[in-house]
Image (cartoon, rainbow, N blue to C red):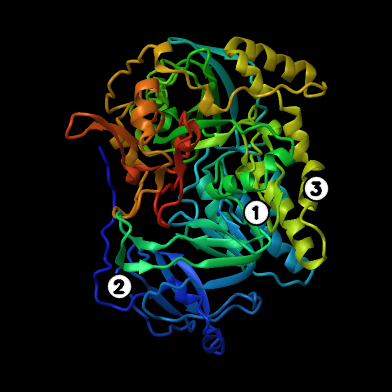
Amino acid sequence: MRYDNVKKDHSHCNCIMLNFRSLFSKSKSKIASTGYLLRATTTSQCLHTKIHTPNANNSHHVFSPRYPHIAFSFSKPPARFNSRVPTSRTFCTASSERDSIEYDVVIVGAGPAGLSAAIRLKQMCRERNADLSVCVLDKGAEVGAHIISGNVFEPRALNELLPQWKEQEAPITTPVSSDKFWFLTKGRAISLPSPFNNQGNYVISLSQLVRWMGTKAEELGVEIYPGFAASEILYDANNKVIGIGTNDMGIAKDGSKKENFQRGVEIKGHITLLAEGCRGSLSEKIIKKYNLRERGGAEHQTYALGIKEVWEIDEEKHQPGAVIHTLGWPLDHKTYGGSFLYHMKDNQISIGLVVALNYQNPFLNPYEEFQKLKHHPAIKPFLEGGTVIQYGARTLNEGGFQSIPYPVFPGGALIGCSAGFMNVPKIKGTHTAMKSGMLAAEATFGALNEGLDMDTYWDTLRNSWIWEELHKSRNYRPAFEYGLIPGLALSGLEHYIFKGRHSFTLKHGKPDHEATNAARFHSPIHYPKADGVLSFDVPSSLHRSNTNHEHDQPPHLRLRDPKSPEHINLPVYAAPESRYCPARVYEYVADEQNQMKLQINAQNCLHCKACDIKDPMQNIEWTVPEGGGGPGYSVM
């Protein structure tokens, strides 16, 4: 069943439509003489195209039905604003041509890594009296809309990037007050020594933090454009990356052009930094095209799926800064994973379950395992009487040190979780992602202004505290390939005795999709029905994710072989895609001949990327939908 939360399309209105392609048209000189600057900001209701007269600040505001979440504002640039940012605007009808705009640096992804890179670049421009134009694109409707994380935040990288973050009122206000580690059985919580050492860290909402970082980047002159999805890499004749292309808008499901069809735009840059997050679609193509894993001597990446809710609980139960991590139940001893419960500010807690995607049993359902977790006797009391505010899910990298690819390619670099810098035993990757963005920014500045090579990014990365931290923690995750109890024993030795100083490095097992066993080796798992109080069905949870996609567009989830689901996944693996997806995108329904066929409800997609990773035949390709689609997180 499809669960839609789709806004109505107002493109039928008879009004002048703003053509984003033409905003960057060739008629720059005409507008340049006026000194007007293009800016994009989010707005909740933009139904008709209107050009308002200049206000006291000598600015115009333009709203477009084709991009209902974007308001374009044309205003006089501040004195220090980068003069190289294009300043043209043109209103015209749709065209089959694709125009382009050029920047010095193009960054794909407005997450911690991408924004850290943008901020560091502009800081260096000010420090060294240089001038670089920097553009950040993000497929979310607004900055932070697709950002989800635990998150116990280690401020090490932020201290380096923006030392005055406390004075500048960053949304980091809840220090860790207690740190507990439990081993769960079905009815008990057994306390273990906590290995996390979260003293000096903070419980935060990462989506709120990146919104704040976005404002800091814009204050420095970075141009940020949310709601535009980078769908392809642009190359020159020598196979060097020269930028990205945004996807076309206004394409119907059948591939035809609708009345509001809008050709995508080429965003070109001398350097392109990919900060798409875990399993970024463009990043994966770049890794394969340039053999970056082989060049870096890296193993395959391993992943986990994190499922999370934010609750508002009774004030008397709230313990600001309290942190709990667990291992064990509800997962079996062959499945790696654990849960977290963090007390945030404002009587809110975040609770989630992380399940490694190399699990073997195709009947396992991570979403339902999470619903079971909330009924555990040690967890339930926190939630009783509370209210769920938001729900979401996202995959995360767990390969660590062994899986870091060579991060530099001709014309750019991978930063953040696109490369995979998460510290698994710490359950943290934000600080390392930010630092990688900062190091890449410094290498980019050197390449554009000092004639240096982008390979200096690789060199500085290996000499940074990222490398030291990930090298020390490299054997924790692969230790659990032998099961939960051996994994605990080996990781205990690693933590308390070896401390990463020994010479051997454990290897990861099979890639996650190969780890799935055939259904005949397992018995079906029967999950309890949701009670609507602590546990919920998928439609209820999906509503809380604020997921929104344009209904009439081609599916962004594509099957390489359309027959594989019915011929292989269903009979051999008992339709695992109907269970590993936390949004019920995939379900099998009977056709006219009563044959089961796979139905893809792409409108439900949370952009978690689990399907792209876990499908046994690697038959599902995740591509970007129209810009602005997907979840709308605000406190995740």
User: How would you rate the neighbour count of disc 2 (Cα within 10 Å): few for under 14, some for 14-19, many for 20 or more?
Assistant: many
Q: Is residue 511 above or below residue 201?
A: above
Q: Are marks 1 and 2 in contact (CB under 8 Å)?
A: no
Which of the numbered marks, if any, corresponds to residue 460?
Answer: 3
User: How would you rate the neighbour count of disc 1 (Cα within 10 Å): few for under 14, some for 14-19, many for 20 or more?
Assistant: many
Instruction: Give percent across and percent down for residue 429.
Output: 62, 38
Give the distance between the C-alpha atoms of the residues marked 1 and 2, in whole angstroms: 35 Å
Residue found at x 40% / y 35%:
311
- The residue that disc 2 covers is 48
Circle nearer the N terminus (1, 2): 2
Q: Are marks 1 and 3 in contact (CB under 8 Å)?
A: no
Identify the element where label 1 is drawn.
Answer: helix
Which of the numbered marks, if any, corresponds to residue 116?
Answer: 1
The kind of residue tagged 3 is: Thr
Does residue 155 appear in this view? Answer: no
Seen from the viewer's position, the closer of residues 101 and 382 is 101
